[in-house]
Image: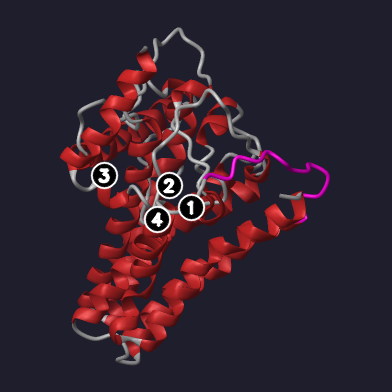
Amino acid sequence: MKPFNRNITYLLSITPALAVIYGNLTGGWWSLLNFAYSLVFLGAAEWLLKPAKDNAHSDKDASLPELILYLHLPMQALCIISYFYGIYADILQGIWLWCAAISMGVNTGSAAIVVAHEFIHRKEKMIQFFGRWLLFTAGNFYFFVEHLRVHHKWVGTTRDAATAKKGQSLYAFFLSSGLGQIKGAWQLENERLTKAGKSIWTLNHYVIRQVVLHLMFDMFIWYWLGPVALLGFVLHCLVANFLLEYVNYIEHYGLSRDEKERVTEIHSWQSDIPVSRFLLVDLSRHADHHSYASKPYHTLRSYENSPELPSGYAGLFFVAAIPPLWFSLMDRRIERLKN
């Protein structure tokens, strides 16, 4: 695939947001459109499609890949605005309000947080701010701190809460990873401010600032649309962060290393299934990302010696949701890697 053709295919990453907006403004069964599209239709497609392992890319013109990332900012805003408008205009009522929240949460977890991940790895302060804003829309107040300062340094070791152990279920991991990262982010910010001679009880503390801002935003939702709308938005945040931890779960499940061992391409699962590659802006080429964390997404490469997931991220969601099925599929792959 030529670099331009590869880059323009990343436009597929905004299609879940379009499905969310349409569902929010139409209501009824359409409120589930993105859930059906992203997890059911695309999940099934990932078991049928062959991997796309080509490494063709061009560093000379990154304008299109960059534009696609920035398109996610207004798309995420429109998803949220259309959800609130759907409630305000009585388009989303009863069970469809909750269905729309779940559908929107799938997009936030698989698009907004993924793009936020790309942004927070950049050095420019403004671009990092965009990443933090996207995380704010997901109600996430720990990933920015933990991912950069802990996960990339300690991935595959017991010091990283975001590395899933062999035999650990997705649900157990969701709790241990989420709580572990919240605790870690809190402690890291405490240490940073203490070293700077500042009080931890200020808005300079990232975790505190994010929580305070979110509470203010939540109060606004309650005042404007009432408690049901707020609970719907909170449900959306829970779904989004569950998907975030699901991604963490499958990216490193059962892969471990000694703390003194350098992180290489063998410490992350990769997938070259086209759906995950282009819908998730090549997040599925995770092995290369951990080898070169600041590498732009459209230049990430596939490694022959990296462990391969049996399907893509969407294709494995319902498998991971059934622990015995996941263990039977993945644990033997881990054992083969050791031989």
| Amino acid type indicated by mark 3 | Ala
Q: Earlier in the sequence, mark 2 or mark 4?
A: 4
Residue 258 shows up from this direction: yes
Q: Tell me whether the residue at label 1 lies in contact with that at label 3, contact meaning CB atoms closer than 8 angstroms.
A: no
> Going by the image, does 124 lie left or right of 192?
right
Closer to the camera: disc 2 or disc 1?
1
Could you tell me if the residues under marks 2 and 1 are in contact, i.e. CB atoms within 8 Å? yes
Which mark is drawn over residue 109?
4
Circle 2 sits on which residue?
Answer: 312
Q: Which numbered marker is on residue 320?
A: 3
**Disc 2 secondary structure class:** loop
Left or right placement of residue 31 versus residue 325 in this view: right
**Residue 42 lies in the magenta stretch:** no
Q: Earlier in the sequence, mark 3 or mark 2?
A: 2
| Residue 205 visible here | no
- Mark in the foreground, 1 or 3: 1
The dot on residue 11 is none
Amino acid type of the residue that numbered disc 4 sits on in the rendered structure: Gly
Residue 49, numbered label: 1
Residue at image location 74% in from the left, 43% down from the top: 57
Classify mark 2: residues with Cα within 10 Å, few (<14), some (14-19) or many (20+).
many
How far is the residue under mark 4 from the one under mark 1? Answer: 23 Å
Tell me which residue sits at (35%, 38%) in the image: 250
User: Alpha-carbon distance for marks 3 and 4?
Assistant: 16 Å
Q: Amino acid at mark 2?
A: Gly
Image height check: is 314 above or below 223? above
Q: Position of residue 251 (x, y in %)?
A: 40, 35
Span highlighted in magenta in the image: 51-63
Q: Give the mark toward the camera: 4 or 1.
A: 1
